[in-house]
Amino acid sequence: MSQHNIIGSEAFTRGPMILVRQYRAGGARRRRARTAAAFIAGATAMLLAGLVGAAVVYGPGLAG
């Protein structure tokens, strides 16, 4: 969500441009970190499922 509080037509006035020097950082970084964590968790789950599947398929052949 946006952190701006623009009311009415103040966004379209021809006044001087104001540079934003401070803003609340971290929103995009948190979202990127959450996406990376979800990707790693999914990849780990798929790897574990693959290992379990291989053990089920090849396990009986290795025991005898």
Image (cartoon, helix red, strand yellow):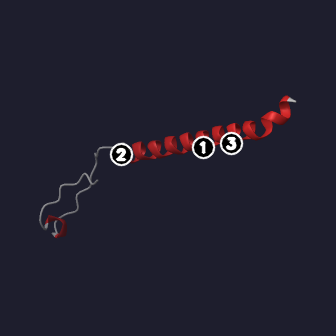
Relative to 8, residue 30 above or below: above
Residue 49 horizontal side relative to residue 18, left or right: right
Residue 43: which disc? 1
Between disc 3 and disc 1, the foreground one is 3
Q: Position of residue 30 (x, y in %)?
A: 40, 42
Q: CA distance from mark 3 to mark 1?
A: 10 Å
**Residue type indicated by callout 1:** Ala
The quarter in which the C terminus is drawn is top right
Query: What is the distance, in whole Å, between disc 2 and disc 1 at their CAs?
Result: 24 Å
Relative depth, front residue between 61 and 1: 61
Where residue 39 appears, x then y in whole percent? Answer: 54, 45
Q: Amino acid at mark 3?
A: Gly
Left or right of 30? Residue 6 is left
Residue sticking out furthest to the right: 64
Which label's residue is closer to the chain start, 3 or 1? 1
**Residue lying furthest left in this view?**
8
Residue in view at x 34 percent, y 43 percent: 25
Circle 3 sits on which residue? 50
Whole-number angstrom distance, CA of label 2 to CA of label 3 = 35 Å
| Res. 8 mark | none
